[in-house]
Amino acid sequence: MKKIIISTIILIVLVIIVNNVRIENIKNNNSLSLKDTMFFDEPIQTKSSGEKEVLTVNGQEITIQKLYNYEISGKVVKTYTYKDYYTGNEVYNTISKKDVGIIYGELINDEYLKNIKFSMNGGRNLRYTYKYGEWLSKLGGKEKLMTLCTNNHLITDNSNISKLIKYISEGDYIKISGYLVNVYWDNSYLKTSTTRDDDQNGACEVIYVTDVKWYK
């Protein structure tokens, strides 16, 4: 019995190691050098066609409206993955299974980050608490802080992109490319934020993802 337990433990450890190596290989194969781009810049947003497109995402038919071409690079401070049937948001959580909280700009600095604590929950919001001090004035105040944090609802109907989204983890430096979209299904809808200075409900970016890259 003891030998079976030991063998089982060894097998579990090996599976974890192999899985972690596989994930790192995927990230390395989809990577960018920090020398190639300024990931501190704010998101790039340009007007798109506004066309509507019908997709099937995780078995749910939806219509997306592409409002803006969108590209965001920064540090992942929180992620949250949703089950298919989270009460009250069944379709919502089916079409967008993962939220990714990203910071960028001057905020990607340990001098500031050590004073901030980020959290995320089933309410699909990125929340933060912080200590008051000189660092906040140096950053530009709480209004500036708010503009450098963003929660992103990620959507894709592409299985390969879906795998990349799955591997986004807290602490990663990433670049997400795609479109800011409004989403419609049945008699419901999900609208994206199109500005960086809003907060509360409706302040999250809804991104139809076309690519994910990791910065080395």
Image (spheres, grey):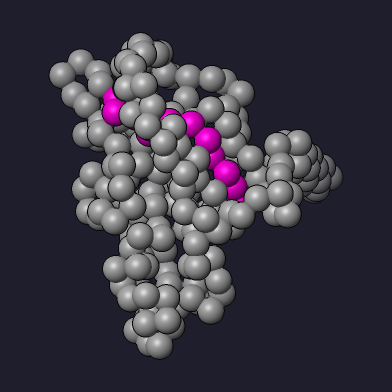
* Residue 10 in the image, given as x and y percentages of width and height: 81, 45
Left or right: 81, with 166 as reference point = left
Q: Please say whether residue 140 is visible from this viewpoint.
A: yes
- At x 63%, y 40%, the residue is 213
Between 164 and 42, the one lying in front of the other is 42
Between 49 and 66, the one lying in front of the other is 49
Reply above or below: 146 against 201.
below
Reply above or below: 103 against 27.
below
- Magenta extent: 173-183
> Residue 179 occupies which quadrant of the picture?
top left
Is the N terminus in the top left, top right, bottom left or bottom right quadrant? top right
The count of marks equals 0
> Residue 81 occupies which quadrant of the picture?
top left
* Residue 41 in the image, given as x and y percentages of width and height: 52, 55
Between 193 and 131, the one lying in front of the other is 193
Left or right: 143, with 27 as reference point = left
Main secondary structure found in the magenta portion: strand
Q: Is residue 129 magenta?
A: no
* Residue 8 in the image, given as x and y percentages of width and height: 76, 41
Q: Please say whether residue 12 is visible from this viewpoint.
A: no
- At x 57%, y 44%, the residue is 175
* Residue 107 in the image, given as x and y percentages of width and height: 48, 67
